[in-house]
Image (tube, rainbow, N blue to C red):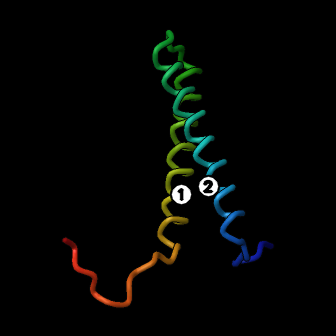
Amino acid sequence: MYKKEFRLNMRELEIIEDCLRQRVSHLAMRIHDAQEATIHSEDSAIIKADLERLREIKDLLGEIHNQKIWFHPKENVPLG
């Protein structure tokens, strides 16, 4: 059984996001390199798995982004 909520401070959340972005970069490079190389049938399955993992991580980063509370001025601020 897992907790449904976690308490993280801003620095901890930033570390998690940085690690996820680093993993996205690593997977993207792996996919690119595999696509440039001669692709065997078993390599195709690896690429598909990497693409799926990449999608999952990007979705998670999107969920984190959407749950943040962004600053909005209380008063209307003129834009120029």
Name the quarter where the N terminus is drawn. bottom right
Mark 1 is on which residue type? Leu
Specify the label residue 7 is tagged with.
Answer: none
Residue projecting furthest to the front:
80
Task: Name the spot of residue 70 as percent of width and height, x first.
Answer: 46, 75
Q: Nearer the viewer, residue 65 or 32?
A: 65
Local packing at callout 1 (Cα closer than 10 Å; few below 14, some 14-19, many 20+) is some
For residue 13, which quarter of the picture? Answer: bottom right
Q: Nearer the viewer, residue 8 or 44?
A: 8
Q: In this image, 33 relative to 80: left or right?
A: right
For residue 25, which quarter of the picture? Answer: top right
Look at 51% across and 51% down and name the residue there: 58
Up-down relation of residue 64 to residue 74 (above or below): above
Look at 50% across and 77% down and name the residue there: 69
Local packing at callout 2 (Cα closer than 10 Å; few below 14, some 14-19, many 20+) is some
Residue mark closest to the camera, 2 vs 1:
2
Specify the label residue 61 is tagged with.
Answer: 1
For label 2, the SS is: helix
Q: Label 1 near label 2: C-beta < 8 Å?
A: yes
Mark 2 is on which residue type? Glu
Task: Name the spot of residue 30 as percent of width and height, x first.
Answer: 57, 26
Look at 70% across and 78% down and name the residue there: 5
Look at 58% across and 46% down and name the residue there: 21
Task: Name the spot of residue 44 as percent of width and height, x first.
Answer: 52, 24
Q: In this image, 20 relative to 39: left or right?
A: right
> Mark 2 or 1 closer to N-term?
2
Up-down relation of residue 77 to residue 24 (above or below): below
Residue projecting furthest to the bottom:
75
Please name the residue that numbered disc 2 is placed on.
17
Could you tell me how far apart the alpha carbons at marks 2 and 1 are, in whole angstroms? 7 Å
For label 1, the SS is: helix
Q: Nearer the viewer, residue 42 or 62?
A: 62
